[in-house]
Image (tube, rainbow, N blue to C red):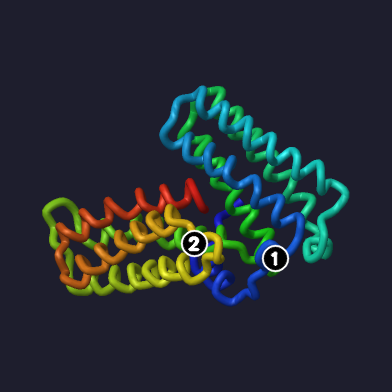
Amino acid sequence: MKSLSRWTLAAAVACASPVWAADAFTDAVQATYPAYRSVLFKTNSATQEECRQALAQAQSAWQQVAGRFAAGAPTPYDRDTQTSATLREVAAVYAQAGAEIERNQLKEAHETLEKVRDLLAAMRQRNQVVVFSDHMNAYHEQMEHVLTAGPGLLGGSGASGTSGSFTALALEVGALQHLAGRLSSQADAGLRANPEFNTLLKAVQQSVADLRAAVLAQDAAAAKAALGKVKGPYSRLFLRFG
């Protein structure tokens, strides 16, 4: 499955009427997310055995959801003819990742597991359901674009970039800063009252502010250094609250 475009995802999150914990199915799916985030994180940094254990927990959590709603999901998903297929597709992604982990292909398993996020985001979008994870996903899509395009716009090693390339990058970083702001404005009261969430979110927003300052100053060396410090804070926030 292709990832949602970052513009489609951002627009959907910005424009949809949010549904927060509005039905048992959304709540049950979101309850599987900590286990999913754990195995996604571990396939990027941990040992094969740790990945095996994390995947088993994620699969167990998902099997409970799939079994509970095999006969059908409640409103608004009851009008979505693809909901049952999505349940099966997520299970298939976990199975594929499991086979890759057994072959110790952890990088491949990580890429495979990314599809779970896309499948669930697409399902919510079809049904006009928005949860905090969607705002995290929108930020992630734009972050990955900035991290991919940024070095090229700044030029190679020893290059200083051009005025036009700094302007182009500033526009992309501006979009990222907007989405970072939405991580704060769209967090529910429970998250906003959580000191750990606030600390991790502040680190995300500071990483973007530092990047923006370097780009606006047209300081290629500082901008390249700041690019290298953007992903870590997001990863830590995603692991705990994404």
User: Label 2 to label 1, Cα distance in Å?
Assistant: 31 Å
Disc 2 is placed on an element classified as loop
Q: To which quarter of the image does residue 156 belong?
A: bottom left
Q: In this figure, which residue is indicated by the disc labeled 2? A: 193
- x and y percent of residue 106 in the render? 48, 31
* In this picture, residue 56 sits left or right of residue 77: left
Where is 194 relative to 90, above or below? below
Disc 1 is placed on an element classified as helix
Where is 3 relative to 6, above or below? above
Going from N to C along the chain, the mark reached first, 2 or 1, is 1
- x and y percent of residue 111 in the render? 51, 42
Comparing 215 with 187, the one in front is 187
* In this picture, residue 96 sits left or right of residue 64: left
Q: Residue at x 42, y 62 (%)?
A: 142
Nearer the observer: mark 2 or 1; the answer is 2
Q: To which quarter of the image does residue 188 belong?
A: bottom right
Q: Amino acid type of disc 2?
A: Ala
* Crowd tier of the residue under label 2, counting other residues whose Cα lies within 10 Å: few below 14, some 14–19, many 20 or above: few
Q: Residue at x 79, y 51 (%)?
A: 84
Q: Residue at x 60, y 27 (%)?
A: 99
Comparing 182 with 2, the one in front is 182
- x and y percent of residue 15 in the render? 58, 77
Q: Amino acid type of disc 1?
A: Arg
* Crowd tier of the residue under label 1, counting other residues whose Cα lies within 10 Å: few below 14, some 14–19, many 20 or above: some
* In this picture, residue 3 sits left or right of residue 206: right
Q: Residue at x 43, y 56 (%)?
A: 195
Q: In this figure, which residue is indicated by the disc labeled 1? A: 126
Comparing 186 with 220, the one in front is 186
Where is 171 relative to 141, above or below? below
